[in-house]
Image (spheres, grey):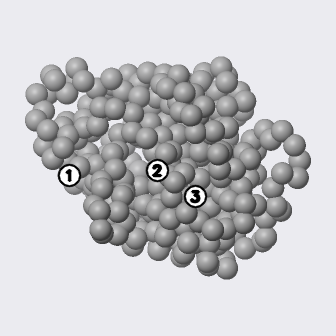
Amino acid sequence: MKLGRFVVDTHVHAQRFAAGAALREKQAQPGQEWEALSSVLGALEPYDNSERLLYDMECYGVDMCVLLPAFGMSNELNARIVEAHPDRFVAVCNAHEYLERVRKGEEEWSIEGVCAELDRLLATGRYVGIGEGSPYMPFPPNPREPVSQETATRNMLRIMEVAARHGVPVQLHTGCPMGYGPTTYSTGALGGFNLNPLWAHDLAAAFPDVPLVLNHGGVQGWWSEKLQEDCLHVAAAHSNVYLECGLWWAELYERALADPNIGPEKLLWATDWGASMPFHYQPGRYPPVYPVQIRSQGVVHHQVDYWGWSLRELQRLRIPQDDLNLILGGNAARIYRLPVKHTRLFRPPVPR
Ligand SMILES: [Zn+2]
């Protein structure tokens, strides 16, 4: 049975990299594959993986997807996928093409350059927001150049200004999948907000009319609930903060739903469809299954099935269907302005 009347995954990657040749060239052993992959990702050409995505949408009854460009993925390719299937996809944008010019040495990175690029892309009307995460970190990233909270926050505020002008939501990345090697996990590379979601209080307070979406709601991978709690703290305090929750296990939904200042209105079903992140199974422990990259096992080569697992976790929630419909697609329709076939399909949100 389809789990809701309008099902939208708000965190999907329809592009994929053919990394095999580059990894072979690097002669990476299984224990070093993730690191080798992160070092070549910027230079790889992504390809359109939407045929496989449409197959999975059919399998699991997913009506629409919000396409996100992760690192190295092209805004233009996502826009073309949207144009081929306007009833199935919308896309958010990052500053990929600008960062490519910086990577090639054609331009010097500046937050002004980032904002000009986002402004230009949003003015085309082809994108419904800014993501995945937001490009607030100086580029190229350098773990020997830590980025302070003040710099990160000031840069993010500039990006939020652009979003406010265009009336679109902004995404901020929280959580991490554990692979990709040691240089990825630094404030200079990953971005300080990732591991410090509480910093987002400043952003939400400064722009109360801009929807702020915390990618992964603190849990992109790993078993810890620490970052989820930080994300809940921010969401409970601001009516404009939303949490992506598709990689949460059932118990994580329950604590967000029980909080009277969060509730179903602030949750967006959103996995990481298209990402290279397998699930770890530890029977008898909590949680029995969770997504994480396992460095010793090397890079995943198949299309990981996020939806089957995530929908089974959601199915364990004994909540009103109208609440579930908000999480599965009603909230996404509201904040990303998705085309919905009828009015009054969703319970009007309780202000929280
Ligand atoms: Zn992602």
Total marks shown come to 3
Using residue 161 as the reference point, say whether residue 24 is left or right of it: left
Instruction: Answer few, some or many: residues within 10 Å of disc 1's Cα (few below 14, many 20 plus, some between 14 and 19).
Output: few
Q: Amino acid at mark 2?
A: Trp
**Label whose residue precedes the other's in the sequence (2 or 3):** 2
| Mark 2 residue CB less than 8 A from any atom of ligand 1 | no
Tell me if 43 is positioned left or right of 101 in this view.
Answer: left
Alpha-carbon span between mark 2 and mark 3: 10 Å
Front residue of 51 and 47:
51
Residue designated by label 3: 315
Q: Which residue is mark 1?
A: 182
| Observer-nearest of 296 and 207 | 296
Q: Which residue is mark 2?
A: 309
- Nearer the observer, 58 or 43: 58
Give the amino acid at mark 3. Answer: Gln
Q: Regarding mark 2 in the picture, which secondary structure is present there?
A: helix
Q: Earlier along the polypeptide chain: callout 1 or callout 2?
A: 1
Where in the figure is residue 152, as x and y percent of width and height? 44, 59
In the rendered structure, the answer to whether residue 136 lies left or right of residue 301 reads right
Residue type of the residue flagged with mark 1:
Pro
Asked whether residue 302 appears in the rendered view, the answer is yes
